[in-house]
């Protein structure tokens, strides 16, 4: 074999000499659709619940925790302007950032220009919809044409990509106002970035978790109405849980990743972090859909009805084993099941698949090792803040030794996993799982959608969460059920006190 191996080394070196940027996508696309797949929805439709009248509060500080729907009504009825709202949230970001460390850069010039345009349009009766004039932030792995895109990592802290990510463009087309680029744990791991550790507003002795650290922290602290995060293996679920937010991780292929940092081409997903399920549905409706710049996007209908009341007739599965644990999070999870039953749902126990998702997970490490091989070859991985055994530098180095054959075998096993899970979920509307059970790894590999939302508090007074899970491209039903549950509870209305 020696001659063959020697010749391969020369081929590898030729490829390395190409110095491919992170934006170059492999000529292989992951497709999560199982054999025989039938979509739950066959039509598009988006209907919001009937909103009530909203009055501008005497104390404008109360606006910090208003939902997108509430802020939108104030804007639509001209009780406040987008410029005023933009200044309000920029001021809050600047006030709390020194303690929470959730902003990498502000986009003020762009924000005030777009806010003034929104005000002119609304005044002229050209109302674009619920997001018109609403400020938002993005995780700084999404590029913008007029500012740096740092990936939260020292080697990239001066990087300029000169394009607007598709998600940013779609939100601005809907009239939303980008005001800040937010922290992420370096290269989408954890909450530790080159500027420090992003904090949890509920307890500033703790990090906000990651890797959508700044997005979750800023929304929780009432410094943004919503933000965009990303998830590859828990990066929306984990910080949304830590900070008490609501987050949506869409199905793989639902939202364009054009202009976003690649960590794992077959696992990366972009989604909103918000105050409520309804807000998540609003943002998702604006950003979902195919994109010719991202060949991994998949056409599928999105049918959401926010007027549905109660869960009578719904068949809701739950992964049986993890609900048998007896820590406080699981007590809260069990109470969630009880509430769903009270709302009329039929609860059906299901089992995890036999195909071992844990043995497939190194697909992520192989793809990440390729995405950031440049750092290993140039020894710039030494510039990353975290250098422990489980941190990216060691993962990237170890990934260079994963055989291509085993990577392919893992993806073949992934096909089995997708098929097995599809068969398990047939006949269910949605299912429920504890946020940090093995379901998290499973569904990031299969591409199934997830809504994470608060379902109580632990003994230290910090939020706990539950995940509402759906069949592939079943965001409509997941969001409907999660909204019904959320409106029957009040956990999402609780906020940190911010006594600092």
Image (cartoon, rainbow, N blue to C red):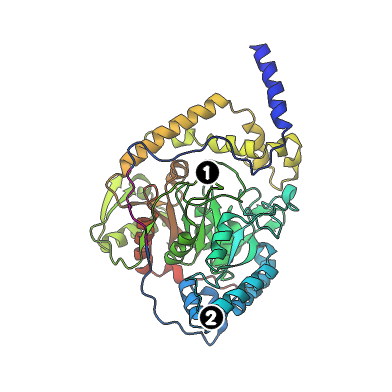
Q: What is the tally of numbered marks visible in this picture?
A: 2
> What element does badge 1 sit on?
loop
Q: Position of residue 45 (x, y in %)?
A: 36, 61
Q: Nearer the viewer, residue 136 or 335?
A: 136
Q: Examine the residues drawn in magenta and state their main secondary structure.
A: loop
Q: Nearer the viewer, residue 84 or 247?
A: 84
Q: Is residue 249 left or right of residue 481?
A: right
The CA distance from mark 1 to mark 2 is: 38 Å
Q: Is residue 474 left or right of residue 24?
A: left
Disc on res. 32:
none
Disc 1 crowd rating (10 Å Cα; few below 14, some 14-19, many 20+) is: some
Q: Is residue 155 left or right of residue 203?
A: right
Q: Position of residue 4 (x, y in %)?
A: 65, 14
Q: Quadrant of the C terminus?
A: bottom right
Q: Is residue 38 left or right of residue 257?
A: left
Stretch in magenta: 38-45
Residue 273 against residue 300 in the figure, above or below: below
Q: Is residue 40 magenta?
A: yes
Disc on res. 124:
2
- Of the two numbered discs 1 and 2 in the rendering, the one whose residue sits closer to the viewer: 2
Disc on res. 295:
1
Sequence order check: which comes first, mark 1 or mark 2? 2
At 48% from the left and 67% from the top, the residue drawn is: 275
Residue 11 against residue 295 in the figure, above or below: above
Q: Quadrant of the N terminus?
A: top right
> What element does badge 2 sit on?
loop
């Amino acid at each position: 074999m020696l001659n063959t191996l020697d010749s391969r080394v020369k081929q590898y070196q030729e490829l390395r000499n190409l110095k491919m940027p992170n934006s170059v996508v492999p000529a292989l696309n992951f497709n999560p659709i199982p054999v025989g797949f039938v979509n739950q929805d066959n039509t598009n439709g988006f209907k919001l619940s009937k909103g009530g009248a909203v009055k501008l509060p005497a104390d404008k500080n109360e606006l910090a925790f208003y939902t997108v729907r509430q802020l939108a009504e104030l804007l639509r009825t001209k009780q406040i302007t987008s410029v005023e709202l933009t200044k309000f949230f920029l001021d809050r970001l600047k006030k709390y950032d020194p303690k929470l460390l959730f902003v990498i850069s502000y986009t003020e010039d762009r924000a005030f220009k777009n806010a003034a345009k929104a005000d002119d349009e609304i005044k002229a009766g050209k109302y674009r919809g619920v997001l018109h004039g609403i400020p938002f932030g993005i995780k700084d792995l999404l590029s913008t044409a007029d500012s740096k895109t740092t990936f939260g990592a020292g080697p990239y802290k001066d990087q300029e990509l000169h394009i607007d990510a598709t998600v940013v463009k779609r939100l601005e087309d809907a009239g939303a106002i980008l005001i800040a680029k937010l922290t992420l744990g370096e290269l989408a791991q954890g909450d530790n970035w080159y500027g420090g550790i992003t904090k949890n507003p509920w307890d500033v002795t703790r990090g906000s978790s990651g890797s959508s650290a700044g997005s979750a922290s800023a929304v929780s602290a009432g410094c943004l109405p919503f933000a965009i995060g990303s998830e590859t293996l828990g990066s929306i679920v984990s910080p949304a849980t830590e900070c008490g937010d609501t987050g949506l991780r869409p199905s793989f292929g639902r939202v364009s990743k054009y202009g976003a940092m690649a960590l794992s081409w077959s696992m990366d997903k972009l989604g909103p972090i918000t105050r409520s399920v309804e807000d998540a549905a609003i943002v998702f409706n604006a950003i979902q859909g195919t994109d010719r710049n991202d060949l991994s996007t998949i056409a599928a209908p999105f049918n959401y009805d926010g007027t549905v009341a109660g869960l009578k007739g719904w068949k809701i599965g739950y992964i049986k084993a993890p609900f048998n644990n007896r820590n406080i999070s699981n007590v809260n999870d069990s109470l969630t099941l009880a509430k769903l039953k009270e709302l009329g749902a039929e609860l059906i126990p299901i089992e995890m698949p036999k195909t071992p998702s844990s043995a497939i997970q190194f697909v992520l490490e192989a793809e990440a090792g390729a995405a950031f091989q440049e750092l290993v070859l140039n020894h710039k991985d030494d510039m990353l803040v975290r250098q422990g055994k489980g941190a990216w530098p060691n993962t990237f180095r170890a990934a260079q030794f994963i055989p291509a054959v085993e990577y392919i075998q893992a993806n073949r096993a992934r096909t089995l996993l997708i098929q097995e899970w599809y068969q398990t979920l047939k006949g269910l509307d949605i299912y429920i799982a504890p946020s940090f059970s093995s379901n998290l790894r499973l569904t990031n590999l299969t591409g199934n959608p997830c809504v994470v939302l608060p379902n109580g508090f632990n003994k230290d007074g910090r939020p706990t969460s539950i995940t509402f899970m759906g069949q592939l491209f079943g965001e409509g039903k997941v969001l409907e059920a999660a909204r019904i549950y959320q409106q029957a509870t009040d956990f999402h209305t609780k906020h940190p006190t911010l006594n600092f």
